[in-house]
Structure formats: C-alpha cells, structure tokens
Amino acid sequence: MKKILLGDEAIVQGALEAGVDFVTGYPGCPSAEIGEEFLKLGEKYGVYAEWSINEKIALESAVGASFSGLKSLVNMKSFGINVCADSLLPLAYTGTNAPMVIVVADDPSNHSSAQSEQDSRQYAFLSHIPMLEPSSPKECYTFTKLAFKISEKFKLPVILRITTRVAHQRMPVDIKEVKERKKQMGEFIKNPDQYSTLMPKTLEMKKELLKKIEKIKLFAETSEINVAEGKSSKLGIIASGVSYLYIKEALDILGLDLPILKLGFFYPLPEMKISRFLNGLEKVLVLEEIEGLLEKEIFKIMGKPLPDGRQAKAEILGKNLLSEIGEMDIEKTCHALAKLANRQYKKPIIKEKALPIRTPRLCEGCPYWYAFATIKKVAPKGTIFGGDIGCNMMAGLNPHNIQDYLFSMGSSLGISHGVKKSTNQKVISIIGDGTFFHSGIPALINSVYNKSNQLIMVLDNRITAMTGHQNNPGEILEIEEIARACGVKNIKVLDPINMKELEETIKDYLNKEETTMIVCKRICALLAKRSK
C-alpha cells in the first residue's frame, strides 16, 4: 500500500517492518518526529520507546538492549552524536548482539541549530561504523530496513545519516502492513570476551573490526543502493544524500543527460565501483553536504589502479565550485553543473518585495519574559551572562541581550565556572529544565565542589519546549532537591511572574560567596493553553 510519509516517518515505518523492539533517543530537530512516532505507536507494535535524558544514555540503553538480544534504534540530531561518542567508539569494538541502527540528523544551514554547522559523516571514519545516506523518504524507508540487515549480518551498529531536507520532505512510499504484537523480552547472556573493552584485547578487537569493514566494503560493491545511471559521456557526476535530488532537477533545467553514480553507502565506500565509474571520464562533479569528505576519498581512490591496471585520471570538481557553508540548493547545483558542462546558466529573475527581517522571539505569555526582564533590570553593570540551549537562547536577542556565550547543552554552568575562577566579575548562568537534566548536573557539582559563586537561574517551564513539548524528568524529580543533594545551600523556588520577589532574590544571591540557584517555575504558555 502507498502512504505519504515524512522522511522521519519513513524511518519509523522501515524500523517497524524490520522488527525493531527497543527505541531510545533525545529530542532535537530535525529528528524529533522519529521518537514522537515511536512513543505513539510503540505499545501497539510491541516496541519499548523512551526519551532518554541525553544521547549518551540513549545509546548505552540501546547497547544494553542489543546485548540482551533485542533489535534497537537510537535517534538524535547532529550534536547528539558528540554527546554519545564516548560509548559509540567502544561499541564498534564490541559489536552488537542483536541489530542496532543509529539515526543522526544533520542540519545544514543551521535552520534549527545554534552551536555549529556539523557534518556528522566524520564519525564514520572515526568510529569505523558503517554509514548509509538516504536522499528521500522512500530511501529512508528502504535504507532503514537495509541497515538492520547489515547490522545483523556483520554484528555492527549502522549509522543512518539524514539531513533536514531529507527528514522533512514528504513523498508517497510503498509500505507493507505491520502486524500488532506484544512487547518482546530479551535475555542477557554473559560474554565478557565480547562486551568488555579491557587491554590488551582492545587491540585485537580493533583488528577484528577492521576485518569486518573490509567485508562490508565487498558488500557495498554489489549493494543496490550504490547505483550508476544516465548516458555515457566524458563528463560524470557522483552524488550522495539529498544532493542527488538537486542534481536530477539541475540536469533537467539545463537539458543534460549525464552519467550519475549515486552512493547510498558513505562508509565504507565501494572503491572498485567508483574507480570503474571514473575510468574514461575527463571531468567529474562531486555533490555532497556539507564538507568535501566524499571528494577527498575519491581523490584517494583515483590513486589506486583497477585490477586490470587501468587508472582514472579525471579532473575532480567539488568544493572548488561549491561552498562548505550552508546546505545545497538548486541554484548552487545549476551553477556547478553549468561549469562542468561549459554551459551558460542565468539565475531566474524573481521579483520579491523587501520583507522586514524577523528574529525569533518568545511566545506571548511565556514566563521567560518576566525572568529576562528582571535579570536585565537587576544585574549590575558588567555582569556576565552564560547562555544555554533551549528557549532561553532568546536571551541573546532583542530586546533582552543578556547572553555573552552559547556553546552546547549544559555548557553555561561550566563556562561560567571558568569565568568566575578567572575574574572578579558577577556571573549569572541561565539554563532550562530540560537542559539541566540533560547535562547541567555534572557542571553544577563541579561548581559546588570547586567553590564557584556563580548564580544559576534555572528556567523551569515544566517541559522540553523548544523541540516540541517532550516530557522530561521534571515530572517526577524536583530540580531544587537535586541541587540541594549536590551541595547547593542557597536555593529559592519562585514564580517569575512575581518580579519583585525575583528581583530581591537575585540581588541577595549575587553577593553570596558560593554557588546559588534560583528556580523560576512556571508552566510554558503554549503547554498551559494546550492543557486546557
């Protein structure tokens, strides 16, 4: 049967058809819909699904499920793979017991990301974990099923790397009916030789891992997700991910029919297939988001002759024509293709009315309005403001302008501690409740243990709001109790709408000689409205 699916929804469908048992993740755009769908459908199809408190724990939970014989899937946005990297690399050494797929969603052009424009494909080389890169919802569906098969065959996790345009495009997908079933229970059978990464056997484990990758290379050579198409020519194109869709449209716009090698396997690459495609070509355009990683690998492959002695000598065009900044689009692709084919291309003239520039802003009735206004009013001149991830990022924009640094989840507390230990300036760290549970607690303990006197403002709006109102441990755990257990003595819980009380507390706590905390507790305005 056919169904119109988002890329994220297609991944869910593919995983259900593959018989996934255990799903974990942490919400983040553009991958949040994956976890949301599993939370809706899990009980019906016998899948255990959860939002873990961070990506490292999500991955580790899935590892436990895999070691216990259950098929697992982990979903996260790009920065999440950084958080779980400590456990990701040893996982490649131990391998899996039951199949595991790790979905990582990059966000070229930073549509919903603050910290950096990250290309998570780098982790394939670092970890030696196979990586597939779909270009459409149809491929999200088929590649997810294939990823589970590869994982089962080679006893390794498989990373499925998607980007915003892949996750959030829709198309009709031919799917199969999934039968309802009861939740499966596994069994952990002790096997320290496989599951424990202790020296000196880790080097032997790495040796076995590299042997597996060589076998997967051979598998990739004949895989149907690496496909050559188009007429024979002296010009050629190699594309991966959503770039394939752009080049198909660009070829149509310019009236060209050139051979394309579409690579669904990003790691390991089918080197012989690439070499055979390159052989006899004079120029080749390599299309990929974001960095020229595929391009660099192709240069290496060109240095290796085919078994019959032939060697490709094509001119490679890629990031010399296409920027490593921002996502691909049809205009960039048409310009690069025109250069390759020595064609003229003029960008269509579209008359647009000048629209006023709009920056993100807090929702009407958001409790942060009260908190930000009071902090700005009370903080002495020269106060340093530590920013964090979530709705509180708006503190760095007009009309608030109370954010002096922004790095990653929970980093406000850690950086602020360093500032306090290096200067005599007043420091206020601003962090949300979801971020506090994600990675703020270790930084809080460090601040208390090393006797920092920063003021920590936890903006507790009772939900993980920015990514779509996912629940967090604040449902059952009180932030102030955790802080008290971590050694914070001066803690005040208040409603930020009571601006006078908040003002007096900030003044008092800024003069303390130890770590202090104010928990501004008021429900997110949108959540309150929806609850009614």
Image (tube, rainbow, N blue to C red):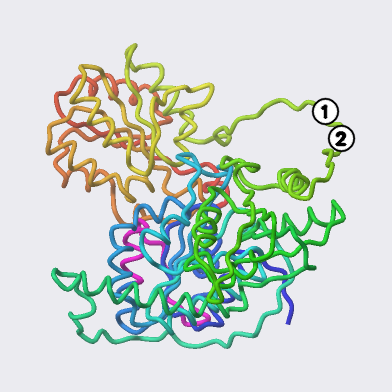
Q: Is residue 53 magenta?
A: yes
Per the rendered image, the range of residues in magenta is 43-62
Of residues 139 and 520, which is closer to you in this image? 139
Q: Which mark is on residue 353?
A: 1
Q: Is residue 76 left or right of residue 177?
A: left
Residue 19 position in % (x across, y down): 50, 83
Q: Is residue 302 visible?
A: yes
Identity of the residue drawn at 37% across and 46% down: 435
Q: Is residue 91 left or right of residue 214?
A: left
Q: From the viewer's perspective, is residue 515 above or below residue 132?
A: above
Q: Which mark is on residue 349?
A: 2
Q: Is residue 468 visible?
A: no
Q: Quadrant of residue 235?
A: bottom right
Q: Secondary structure at mark 1?
A: loop
Q: Is residue 425 magenta?
A: no
Q: Is residue 425 left or right of residue 70?
A: left
Identity of the residue drawn at 29% across and 71% down: 93
For badge 2, the amino acid type reads Ile
Q: Quadrant of residue 362?
A: top right
Q: Is residue 253 left or right of residue 166?
A: right
